[in-house]
Image (cartoon, helix red, strand yellow):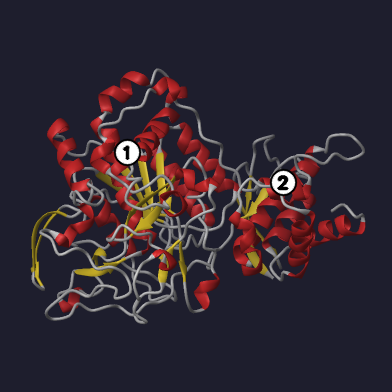
Amino acid sequence: MQNTTLIIDNQILQVKTPGAKANNEVAVDGDNPWDAAHTYREKEKLSALYIEPEIHQDLYDVEKQDQLKLKASQPHYLNNWPNPPTISDNFVWHLLEDYSELKKASEKVWNKIGKAKCIKIAHIDTGYQPNHPALPEFLDSGISFVKGEEGKAAIDVKKKTFGEQEGHGTATMSILAGKKVYFNEHGINYEGQFGGIPFAEIIPIRISDTVALIRSQNFVKAINYAIKEGCEVVSMSMAGAPTKEWAKVVNEAYKQGVTIVTAAGNSWNKGAKRLLPKRLLYPARWQRVIAATGVTSNHYPYIFKAQVGVKSEGGESMQGNYGPKKVMKNAIAAYTPNTPWATMNEADDNILYRFDGGGTSSATPQVAAAAALWLSFFRDEINAQILSKDDLWKKVEAVREALYTSADKDTYPEWEKYYGQGILKAEQALSIFPNFNDLKPAKKAKATLNGIADFLGIMLRLKNDEAMSIDEEIKREMFSTEILQELHNNPELHHFLDADDEFWTDDEKEQLMRSLLDSPSASNTLKSFLNTMLNNNKL
């Protein structure tokens, strides 16, 4: 038996069962988290309520990589990816005009507004390590939602646990809004801004020790906290499998005018991790979120097969995720890998920066910085267009249109396939102000795919020519979310993630059903339902 936390949704009615308040977390015991949810729902007679378990995601933990040390005479880049260009200020090459344009864009915004703390950005990650010289100048103490630290400042605590990625938040936060730094080592002399928007106020929110969303509700709490604190942009270099609670909070943030930028996700081309999904992960996969994909310093995709030349056998095997085609409409690429990477892990060796920053983790804060710059630059113009709270979502759509329209679509021919809308051009985005009357709301986030809905008959199948009962609808919605999580967990089912909002053939449905019936992680409740469908020849 294992302890499981259940999340009870109260959209239809209030929960009256003792110990189970509306939208509360209820701890129960069970052999399978989803079975525990179904059992509790039936036992407590909560047939009108959706209940899901809080999933503990360990699938996306990044492999422990050897900590790369800077050589005495030169920085250590990843050998199997293009090195930064040999140009002036290549310490922050990704900020420069031929790349993201973030340096030029931030100067333009500062010259117009001349105001620090002009916007609040929520940074959801592993927290930060105090005293690093590249940390944002305007850094709030933030909050932690990690178990045992709830309510404390978002300090990255070294726990020496397996999979811990101490310093990840420090690095991504510095890329987002790092202050002016002085660097004169290894043949590189640089003085200037480190981050994309160094005058923003950063609200750090610690939700995990790793880039995996270990407790799914921590993301929900983090977004709600960001909304409460008045953040207009969220930067999160994390990804995972979805829950309904994730979808709900993404929809709420969108409604409140909060632009969420999250990593598309990473995959590996060798080792055990090669079996991880290679398509956009959640929340980045939802249309109401901006997905950050990767482009390398030679302007080719952050995908091994798309690169030119011979790669070294050594170095990092990680690459970015992309696809399927339909969800790439809400994606945009920023530069990675071999970006500067702030680190406190090697401070004892007087190493505060590495040069092997990579993953879509490095790309995400660049896109978030560009979004924040645009919102700051057009502050007055935006306020004139927002006539009521019902119009706040238009801020998100305006940001998206500006970034997407201005993105570079000429440098690489297959930009739609790998980048989405193109390569980030932050300064060019400042020349675009959309017509707010033409903006349309993006499709709502939901924890399912239409193929699954069709498979289960949530939307299409009727019982005895009558609509399904509320109990049946909710039960199948629970099945739908569980199946979507299984598509992420089972390598044999990853190809179902290659299509979004597509209906599947009968053969595909049967393959899915057989795989779910054989899956050790699928709930017995779901398997019983599938067996009934099979016996009744419902497929």
Q: Helix, strand, or loop for circle 2? A: helix
The front one of 9 and 116 is: 116
Q: Residue at x 69, y 71 (%)?
A: 1
Q: Helix, strand, or loop for circle 1? A: helix
Nearer the observer, disc 2 or disc 1? Answer: 1
For disc 2, the neighbor class at 10 Å (few under 14, some 14 to 19, many from 20) is: many
Whether residue 390 appears in this view of the structure is yes
How much space separates mark 2 and mark 1, taking CA atoms?
36 Å
Residue 240: percent from left, percent from top: 52, 58
Residue 464: percent from left, percent from top: 92, 38
For disc 1, the neighbor class at 10 Å (few under 14, some 14 to 19, many from 20) is: many
Q: Is residue 101 above or below residue 467?
A: below
Q: How many marks?
A: 2
User: Dot 1 corresponds to which residue?
Assistant: 406
| 169 lies left or right of 420 | left
Pick whichever of labels 2 and 1 is earlier in the sequence.
Answer: 1
The front one of 37 and 307 is: 307
Mark 1 belongs to which amino acid? Answer: Ser
Q: Are marks 2 and 1 in contact (CB under 8 Å)?
A: no
Residue 385: percent from left, percent from top: 36, 20
Mark 2 belongs to which amino acid? Answer: Ala
User: Dot 2 corresponds to which residue?
Assistant: 453
